[in-house]
Image (cartoon, helix red, strand yellow):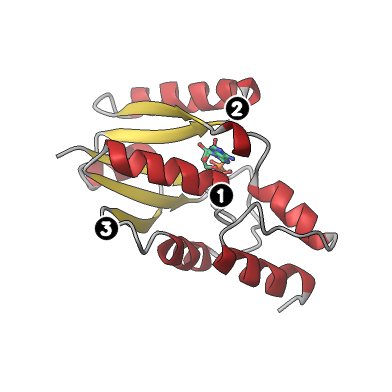
Amino acid sequence: MHHAVYPGSFDPVTNGHMDIIRRASKMFDHLTVAVAYNYNKPAGCFTAEERVSLLRRCTADMPNVSVDICEGLLADYVRRIGAGVVVKGLRAISDFEQEFQQALTNKKLNPDMETVFISSDVEYMYLSSSMVKQVCALGGNVSDFVPAVVKEEIIDRIQNKT
Ligand code: ADP
């Protein structure tokens, strides 16, 4: 069985992430979307549990996709759950250096795992969670950027400050 992990901050999940999830779910028997702690982005808008809950609602129609929290090293997590592949989305060349460095580090830490890069759909190349939060904070419409359930929650969190 081909089991892959798609890790990220997902603070919150965007349509760009959803596109990668949908495409990766067709490439592997099972896909685990793993909300991982990123030391470069400590303070999030949503807690890890809230991100998981949003991801579960957004992937409810995909039976071979599950959502989990990844604590500790990704390389160890992948080994622990018996997955062999890590999926990453690439938006532009600017993503590449950082992602390549991470892939090489993970390979060193867990030689059994492979990192597979999926190129972003051109429609989502510019999209990031931080851009969505910025637009929302300034009162912009985020309908085209995130799934409907995320839109409601992000407006509540950022504009209504709940
Ligand atoms: P991280 O904190 O690891 O950057 P993100 O939640 O920002 O986490 O992104 C998780 C993964 O999804 C990364 O591989 C990132 O390159 C990819 N990704 C983010 N936004 C998009 C997008 N719009 N299109 C394709 N891939 C994306």
Examine the rendered structure and indicate whether residue 8 appears above or below residue 122.
Answer: below
Spatial CA distance of label 1 from label 2 is: 17 Å
**Residue 5 visible in the displayed image:** yes
What's the residue type where badge 3 is placed?
A: Pro
Choose top left, top right, bottom left or bottom right for residue 94.
Answer: top right
* Disc 1: which residue: 15
Tell me the element at label 1: helix
Tell which of 108 and 151 is nearer to you: 151
- Whether ligand 1 has any atom under 8 Å from the Cβ at mark 2 is answered as yes
x then y, percent, for residue 135 = 78, 54
* Disc 3: which residue: 63
Tell me the element at label 2: helix
Q: Local crowd at mark 1 within 10 Å, few (<14), some, or many (≥20)?
A: many
Q: Is residue 154 left or right of residue 108?
A: right
If the picture is divided into quarters, which one holds ligand 1?
A: top right
Compare marks 2 and 3 and give the one earlier in the sequence: 3
Tell me the element at label 3: loop
Examine the rendered structure and indicate whether residue 58 appears above or below residue 4.
Answer: below
* Disc 2: which residue: 95
Choose top left, top right, bottom left or bottom right for residue 69.
Answer: bottom left
x then y, percent, for residue 3 = 23, 41
Compare marks 1 and 3 and give the one earlier in the sequence: 1
